[in-house]
């Protein structure tokens, strides 16, 4: 009996020890074999509002600064009267078969009065109005800042986007927000160091013949791929 | 008596020996030197060709209009699509053939129906279906009659009175609803001229100019955009055509620039015959030849002419008596210039040449010295000899006095003047290989210049600088054509491009030839024009 009791006790101790080992967290084992437990705090344990991105281009940076300057960026009654920082134009991407694909081009104005630091760049944020609200308009096929609505450039603006609405009666309302990256350290003010340009872009449908040609080219490419 | 006879015999023998010896000496000298008969007046008795003065037009190109050629032909729709036709492709040739044979002659004989400001040019090419012909440099209108084979004597209005030159021509097929009328806009240095022309019988139907744009795109023609519709760079011309396609590539060969077979790489006294035949033509026996062993430069000269060729096959010709004071028309001088080149071109590589620029030489009445532009003096003497100022002060040509230097047809400014007469004209030519322009880097100044310049008057050529090369394709690659990539590199190299007035006014692709090197590969280049100067930037290979 005593033996059985001892056996059960030992079995219980072994099972408890195995369980502790299996469920224990990782610890550093310094030389000498002394294990000191270190509590590692995961990011999810810190409230999000306490994480401040170092840069608008770092993860979470766009959302952070958009929230910070939301009153300025998304006031639908306010827009710049002049393009004093950058020029912007929207043209259909003729190489894409999708009529909603557009290219936004422009350049930083040479005569801008904004003080820039050496090697400063211009940050351009793209938004499109959906259901009465401006939401991010992500770029397409971007090599830098992929899948974001941010374009950073020292001089020339080039961004491919896909609009929402097709047809003469459905205008796409875009908002382009531009400011020098160095200005983020301080206060952003409309028409002083921030340019907000609203654009209305109409994506026209193709003509019937265009549809025929596109269809023909797609069929041709299928046959070529089959070969 | 006997002694006297012996003396006489001795004298006779000595005389005979002397005569034989002198004949022997003359024969030795004659066989060792490279020149022929030095007495030109004697050769003149036996020759009908007096050198460079008589022009045999059979030597010239079958179609004289081929001395000019568009740098680019662009087809555009009413919106923002613009396609540059593949150089020397079938569509390109068809379009150019139609314009040069059917419509250019009409630009000579017909008057424009509307004149507009230069600033309206953008309105012409935006919002209209157009086929746009762009030229490297403005073509002086004074050359059009000869180039198009038009008899100017029957013109009611002299050509120079209608417009001074042609920078670009836009064919607007929808400019008139009448199928028998075609509308052309000519961009000139002093404005835009609209011509509404009756479509010639042999001209293409107007529908041809309404091309299938989807087909153009699928054929791989380059898609271009206007600067004013895209980047709107303040310093650049807004009607500049650029590529806005980030994956855009241009397929261009790499060429080897080498010496033609007629020119040896090293000159010796034994191997100059083919060079003489190619350059001196039928006068190869009448010019004195001198070979400088140290510099490797060979000089052929007489009392009127000097031809100098260095070891890099750079020819410099000077007519030592100068341009004179008679004056010449641009057309007469141009005929002499192309004849000079055509007589030699087939023997010196047979590469196509195309007119690049034209300038007129006047004179400074104060100094009396004629200073031709675009002439690089070769060491030893100036380009032309000075003319006494008293002669110049009294010179009047066709009721016009010449004062100062006149430049015509260069750059895009309105300062270009169509000079009907001048003391001489300088024509510069570029090589043209597969439709691409080849310019040269001047060794002394580093500037980018055409490889050939010819100064001529009505009677003859008075000066020529010609870097003689032949070109062979050695490889074919794809090169990045995306404007932002190019402009980023251009700004690093030429930061002044951001300054107002010094921005991009022209942009095209071609090749650059080093003046003093041969047997090297030529890689595709960007030619940027800014403030009337041409700069060069290497193209980046696609995918870099």
Image (cartoon, rainbow, N blue to C red):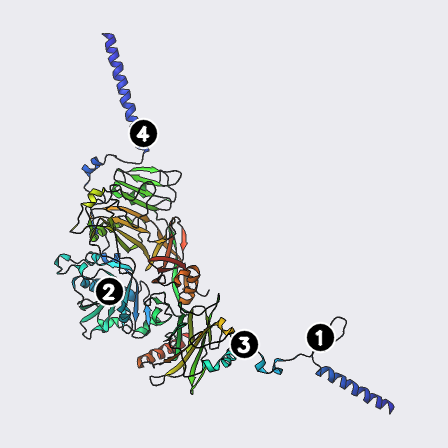
Return the x and y of residue B342 as percentages of the image width and height. 26, 50
Front residue of B130 and B36: B130
Residue named by callout 4: B28
Front residue of B9 and B446: B446
Return the x and y of residue B442 as percentages of the image width and height. 37, 50
Q: Secondary structure at mark 3?
A: loop
Task: Measure the C-alpha gap from mark 4 to mark 2.
Answer: 68 Å
Return the x and y of residue A64 as percentages of the image width and height. 52, 79
The mark closer to the camera, 1 or 3, is: 3
Residue named by callout 3: A59
Dot 1 surroundings within 10 Å: few (below 14), some, or many (20 or more)?
A: few
Marks 4/2 same chain: yes
Front residue of B405 and A3: B405
Marks 1/2 same chain: no
Whether A156 is drawn above or below A208: the answer is above
Return the x and y of residue B385 as percentages of the image width and height. 26, 42
Residue named by callout 1: A28
Q: Residue furthest right?
A: A2
Front residue of B432 and B15: B432
């Amino acid at each position: 009996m005593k033996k059985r009791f001892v056996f059960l006790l030992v079995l219980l101790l072994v099972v408890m020890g195995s369980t502790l080992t299996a469920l224990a967290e990782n610890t550093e084992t310094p030389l000498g074999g002394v294990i000191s437990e270190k509590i590692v705090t995961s990011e999810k344990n810190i409230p999000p509002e306490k994480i401040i991105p170092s840069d608008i281009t770092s993860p979470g940076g766009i959302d952070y600064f958009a929230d910070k300057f939301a009153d300025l960026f998304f006031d639908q009654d306010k827009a710049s009267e002049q393009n004093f920082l950058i020029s912007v134009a929207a043209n259909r991407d003729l190489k894409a078969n999708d009529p909603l694909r557009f290219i936004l081009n422009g350049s930083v104005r040479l005569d801008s009065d904004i003080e820039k630091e050496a090697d400063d760049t211009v940050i351009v944020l793209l938004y499109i109005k959906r259901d009465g609200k401006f939401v991010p308009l992500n770029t397409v096929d971007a090599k830098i800042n992929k899948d974001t609505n941010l374009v950073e450039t020292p001089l020339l603006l080039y961004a491919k986007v896909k609009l929402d609405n097709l047809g003469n009666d459905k205008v796409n309302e875009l908002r382009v927000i531009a400011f020098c990256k160095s200005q983020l350290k301080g206060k952003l003010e409309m028409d002083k160091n921030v340019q907000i340009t609203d654009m209305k872009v109409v994506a026209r449908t193709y003509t019937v013949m265009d549809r025929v040609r596109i269809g023909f080219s797609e069929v041709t490419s299928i046959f070529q791929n089959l070969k | 008596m006997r002694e006297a006879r012996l003396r006489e015999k001795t004298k006779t023998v000595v005389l005979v020996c002397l005569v034989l010896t002198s004949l022997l000496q003359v024969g030795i000298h004659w066989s060792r030197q490279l020149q022929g008969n030095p007495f030109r007046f004697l050769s003149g008795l036996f020759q009908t060709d007096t050198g460079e003065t008589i022009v045999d037009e059979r030597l010239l190109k079958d179609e004289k209009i081929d001395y000019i050629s568009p740098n680019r032909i662009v087809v555009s729709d009413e919106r923002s699509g613009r396609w540059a036709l593949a150089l020397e492709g079938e569509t390109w040739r068809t379009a150019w053939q139609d314009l040069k044979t059917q419509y250019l002659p009409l630009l000579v004989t017909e008057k424009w129906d509307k004149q507009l400001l230069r600033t309206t040019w953008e309105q012409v090419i935006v919002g209209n279906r157009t086929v746009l012909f762009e030229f490297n440099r403005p073509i002086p209108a004074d050359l059009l009659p000869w180039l198009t084979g038009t008899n100017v004597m029957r013109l009611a209005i002299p050509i120079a009175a209608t417009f001074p030159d042609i920078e670009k021509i836009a064919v607007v097929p929808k400019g008139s609803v009448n199928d028998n009328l075609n509308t052309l806009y000519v961009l000139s240095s002093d404005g835009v001229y609209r011509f509404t022309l009756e479509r010639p019988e042999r001209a293409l139907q107007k529908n041809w100019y309404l091309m299938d744009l989807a087909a153009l795109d699928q054929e791989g023609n380059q898609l271009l955009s206007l600067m004013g519709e895209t980047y709107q760079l303040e310093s650049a011309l807004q009607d500049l055509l650029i590529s806005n396609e980030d994956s855009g590539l241009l397929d261009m060969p790499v060429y080897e620039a080498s010496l033609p077979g007629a020119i040896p790489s090293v000159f010796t006294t034994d191997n100059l015959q083919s060079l003489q035949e190619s350059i001196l033509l039928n006068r190869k026996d009448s010019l004195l030849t001198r070979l400088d062993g140290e510099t490797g430069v060979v000089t052929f000269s007489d009392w009127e002419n000097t031809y100098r060729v260095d070891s890099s096959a750079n020819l410099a010709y000077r007519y030592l008596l100068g341009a004179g004071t008679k004056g010449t028309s641009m057309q007469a001088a141009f005929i002499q210039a192309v004849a000079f080149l055509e007589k030699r071109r087939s023997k010196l590589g047979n590469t196509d040449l195309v007119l690049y620029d034209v300038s007129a030489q006047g004179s400074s009445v104060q100094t009396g010295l004629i200073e031709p532009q675009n002439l690089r003096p070769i060491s030893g003497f100036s380009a032309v000899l000075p003319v006494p100022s008293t002669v110049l002060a009294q010179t009047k040509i066709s009721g016009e006095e010449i004062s100062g230097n006149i430049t015509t047809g260069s750059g895009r400014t309105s300062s270009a003047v169509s000079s009907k007469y001048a003391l001489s004209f300088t024509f510069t030519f570029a090589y043209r290989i597969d439709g691409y322009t080849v310019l040269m880097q001047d060794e002394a100044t580093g500037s980018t210049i055409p490889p050939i310049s010819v100064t001529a008057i009505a009677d003859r050529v008075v000066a020529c600088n010609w870097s003689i090369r032949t070109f062979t394709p050695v490889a074919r690659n794809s090169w990045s054509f995306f404007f932002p990539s190019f402009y980023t590199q251009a700004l690093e190299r030429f930061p002044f491009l951001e300054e107002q007035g010094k921005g991009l006014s022209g942009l095209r692709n071609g090749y650059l030839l080093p003046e003093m090197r041969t047997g090297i590969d030529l890689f595709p280049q960007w030619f940027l024009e800014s403030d009337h100067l041409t700069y060069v930037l290497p193209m980046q290979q696609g995918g870099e």
